[in-house]
Every structure is written in structure tokens, then in C-alpha cells.
Image (cartoon, grey):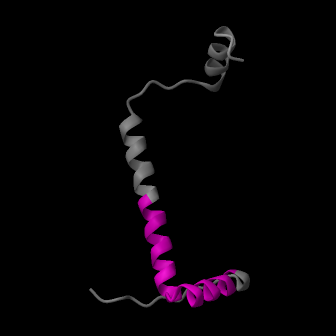
């Protein structure tokens, strides 16, 4: 599958950092951005899976957690 072209506008300081990293790592800015986006999407997928695994757990209010911590002497 070929690459798709997109126009992305970077903050000037961020663009400078990307250019420097690209030059020092022998990777293109496109490669760095693709890698960062893949990482972010994979992290999102992990978070979604974690939520799905825990969706049937009982909900605790913050107040209930504080009461439990106080009653157990941990707070």
C-alpha cells in the first residue's frame, strides 16, 4: 500500500526539533511522525481494551474510597 500525502502544520519549535531529530537519526520527518502516530493509536487501543476488561466492575465513588482508606487506617 502506498503512502498518502497530507499537509500538517507544526509549531515552529516542534518543527525545528523534528528536523533536528530526523537529521541525527537518519529518518525522515514523515517516518518520525508515522511512528509517533502509530504509538499513540496503539496506546489508545490498549486503553480501550483495559476499559472493556473492567466495564463490569462495580463502581466506587471517591468518597467511598476515602472512607475505606480511613476506616482501614491507611489514611
**The magenta stretch spans which residues?**
14-42
Residue that lies at the very extreme toward the left in this rendered image: 1
Tell me the residue at 43%/69% (across/down). Answer: 38
Tell me the residue at 48%/71% (across/down). Answer: 37
Quadrant that contains the C terminus: top right
Total tally of numbered discs in the picture = 0
Specify the quadrant of the image occupied by residue 45. Answer: bottom left
Residue 34 painted magenta? yes
Tell me the residue at 41%/49% (across/down). Answer: 48
Provide residue 23's location: percent of width, then percent of height.
58, 90
Provide residue 7's location: percent of width, then percent of height.
53, 89
Horizontal side of 6 relative to 68 (left or right) equals left
Provide residue 44's location: percent of width, then percent of height.
45, 57
Q: Is residue 7 above or below residue 69?
A: below
Residue 23 painted magenta? yes
Quadrant that contains the N terminus: bottom left
Tell me the residue at 67%/20% (across/down). Answer: 66
Residue that lies at the very extreme toward the top in this rendered image: 71
Specify the quadrant of the image occupied by residue 17. Answer: bottom right
Horizontal side of 2 relative to 23 (left or right) equals left
Q: Is residue 38 above or below residue 54?
A: below
Which secondary structure class fits the magenta region best? helix
Camera-nearest residue between 6 and 39:
39
Q: Is residue 14 above or below residue 23?
A: above
Provide residue 65's location: percent of width, then percent of height.
62, 21
Amino acid at each position: 500500500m502506498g503512502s498518502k500525502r497530507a499537509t500538517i502544520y507544526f509549531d515552529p519549535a516542534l518543527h525545528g526539533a523534528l528536523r533536528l531529530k530526523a537529521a541525527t537519526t537518519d529518518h525522515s520527518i514523515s517516518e518520525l511522525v508515522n511512528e509517533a502516530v502509530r504509538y499513540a493509536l496503539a496506546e489508545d487501543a490498549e486503553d480501550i481494551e483495559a476499559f472493556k476488561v473492567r466495564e463490569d466492575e462495580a463502581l466506587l465513588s471517591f468518597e467511598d474510597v476515602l472512607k475505606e482508606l480511613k476506616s482501614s487506617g491507611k489514611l
